[in-house]
Amino acid sequence: MAPRLCCSSQLLFTVSFLAAFVAVSNAGQVAVYWGQNNGDGTLADTCASGLYNFVNIAFLNVFGQNRAPGLNLAGHCDQAAGTCTSLSSEINSCKASGVKVLLSLGGGAGQYSLDSADDARGVADYLWDNFLGGSSASRPLGDAVLDGIDFDIELGGGDHYNDLAMALSSRCNGACLLTAAPQCPYPDAHLDAAIKTGVFNHVWVQFYNNPNAACQYADGDASALQNAWARWTDAVPAPADVFLGLPAAPDAAPSGGYIDADTLLSQVLPAVKSAPNYGGVMLWDRFRDTTAGYGAKLQGKV
């Protein structure tokens, strides 16, 4: 007896639907850093651009060892004057549009370090109460609840960031994201132990400003980057996915690593996206992206 056409068509539809669903589910996302230049524009406009899935507010660059935690958001606002609370409505606007907003810890300048597991747990308590789901009488960014915490640790040693990650994971209990931004030399000097805890959701590796480490794009050659990418995607524990961190313009990475968007899309991403834990692309930073238009060239293509 010939097969019934209705069932055959239904099977074909189901297979096609599942294939399309997998393709959409595995589509890459885009993260960006915001906060280190007035040319960033507003946080609300950054989210409303439709270019990004994650925005990292950069940076909380003073914390640990009994220091009073402090934000440095360039000219956007002044924590001491209380003006950063104005960002609360912008954060809520971002979240309403489906963009995840995180607070990034560290950066390339500041005063931060952890000297013990207790110190790390104290910082985790501060972050929970002042930026996440806890409560405090003086939340620096107002009442808005951020989606998570990003670790961009570039100074000092790597001691106790694993303790901080574990303490935050325990505090959040699945209710917030944890992300990390290590440098491309593996293992990262500051975040290796933290990443190995397996509590991070996304790891956006900085494949730039590391000219002596043979891990970034240089002189038209992507081989070093691809080798480093393979090392990272093999090493990062589940459930985290891995993002390709790139400068949005040449001057965003004075020590190299810039890849023009056309080359990225045609020559680099096809190989990078073959990793099963590929997550997308991270851009440094929103200020450069507003002038270079890099993110717009990637839209819908990562």
Image (cartoon, rainbow, N blue to C red):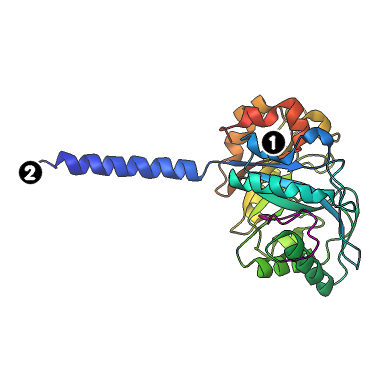
Q: Quadrant of residue 33?
A: top right
Q: Residue 263 at what x, y percent from top left? A: 66, 26
| Local SS, label 1 | helix
Q: Residue 24 at what x, y percent from top left? A: 48, 41
Within 10 angstroms of label 2, few (less than 14), some, or many (20 or more) residues? few
At a point 74% along the width and 65% down the height, the residue shown is 129
Farthest-out residue, bottom: 118
Magenta highlight on residue 263: no
Q: Which of 172 and 228 is in front in this view?
A: 172
Type of the residue with mark 1: Asp
Instruction: Evaluate if marks 1 and 2 touch, with contact meaning CB atoms under 8 Å apart.
Output: no
Residue corresponding to mark 2: 1
Is tag 1's residue or tag 2's residue first in the polypeptide sequence? 2
- Any mark on residue 102, and which? none
- Any mark on residue 45, and which? 1
In the picture shown, does residue 286 fall above or below 193?
Answer: above
At a point 77% along the width and 53% down the height, the residue shown is 141
Q: What stretch is highlighted in magenta?
A: 135-150
Farthest-out residue, left: 1
Q: Nearer the viewer, residue 128 or 156?
A: 128
Q: Residue 125 at what x, y percent from top left? A: 76, 69
Position of 256 with respect to 13 (left or right) is: right
Type of the residue with mark 2: Met
Position of 255 with respect to 51 (left or right) is: right
At a point 85% along the width and 41% down the height, the residue shown is 212
